[in-house]
Amino acid sequence: MKKASIYGLTFEQLTDWLTERGQKKFRAQQVWDWLYRKRVKAFSDMVNIKKDCVLLLEENFVIQTLELHSKQESKDGTMKFLFKLDDGNLIETVLMRFDYGSSVCVTTQVGCNIGCSFCASGLLSKSRDLTSGEIVEQVMNVQHNMDSVGKEERVSHIVVMGIGEPFDNFVNLMDFISVVNSDRGLGIGARHITVSTSGIVKKIYEFADAGIQVNLAVSLHAPNNELRTKIMKVNRGQPIEKVMEAVDYYLEKTNRRITFEYILLDGVNDSAETAHELVELIKDKKRLSYVNLIPYNPVDEYIQYKQSKKGSILTFYDILMKNGIQCGVRHEQGSDIDAACGQLRSKQMKKDREKAKV
């Protein structure tokens, strides 16, 4: 049986695990200090922890489970990491650099079953959820990479927008958030963490009830069921009216702003008429809403889609703003290495298929 990742335990879980085995309660803080502040890669490097505790950890856990398969750096400084999991599957993680800090986009599943018709990540059906440890380890591997080049740079923000639907892996997602948010460890502020969902209604309610300050983004991409179902097959089971009811509950429960993500597809969902329809859909929520307009990033497998023309994007933006809907147009990063929104897994899948033919 494979050993579990030590990164998969929340502080409370590690404390309970150690005390149940006769260790002092304070050992948990020592272990976390070595993992997340000193960032060691071996239990034997935890020099102020008694040998019996170190052996106990070594017998039951591992620190590193991900293997770096490849790394690419964009001309804008964005970095894409392709990691190999213990079972041989590949996942991608992206580091983006902004004026306000360094943000890591993490993956939560191997493949994705949501079926967004513009997204490369969905070309590979979901085979399994990632463990909370595997999600945390993505952040730690990126941080270790920063440490290795001698820069005093730290991961300051996290977006859960990589491969997979985070709310389809809810328990592991919440444990991941607990680990990276804890002041005892990485200490990444809740308001610096954003989770994006395609609109899994039941989990939006649960997320609201969790009482955490983490940001929520909902991938909308269309203002009506007919159009959204064509773009996102998840809408068949999670129709817009149900998503909006859940959003209303979230806003009332948390009083926190929500982001609606909207990828602009030329001639599909970018008309002035569609913009006005979007205004009608969310106008009663505009006090706590923000629309993130995302220019489409090309994916070779989806030749039916093209990026909206600049004029269409500006018209769409103007209609929202003139009707009191706060919005912005996302400046994409990493598109030259297929690390931008909707592009993850595209080129690697093509390479995998080519190898299989040889």
Image (cartoon, rainbow, N blue to C red):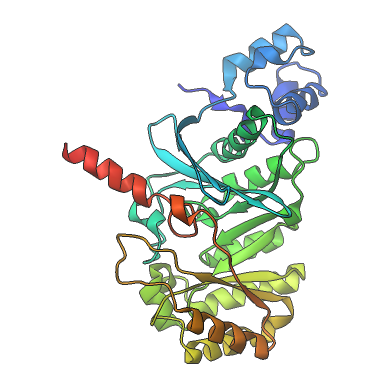
Residue closer to the observer: 196 or 295: 295
- Nearer to us in this view, 119 or 294: 294
x then y, percent, for residue 91:
45, 42
Q: In the picture, which quadrant includes the N terminus?
A: top left
What residue lies at 72% left-to-right and 39% top-to-bottom? Answer: 153
Q: Residue furthest front?
A: 75
Quick one: which residue is furthest to the top in this view? 51
Instruction: Say whether residue 223 is visible.
Output: no
Q: Looking at the image, can residue 9 be seen?
A: yes
Name the residue: 29% across, 43% down.
351
| Residue 43 point in image, percent of width and height | 66, 16
In the image, 286 versus 296, the foreground residue is 296
Residue at x 48% of width, y 31% of height: 68
Taking the image as shown, residue 179 lies to the left or right of residue 234, namely right
State the image coordinates of residue 115 (x, y, percent, origin top left): 38, 63
Residue 135 against residue 144 in the figure, above or below = below
Closer-to-camera residue (165/149): 149
Check the image and report above or below for 175 versus 198.
above
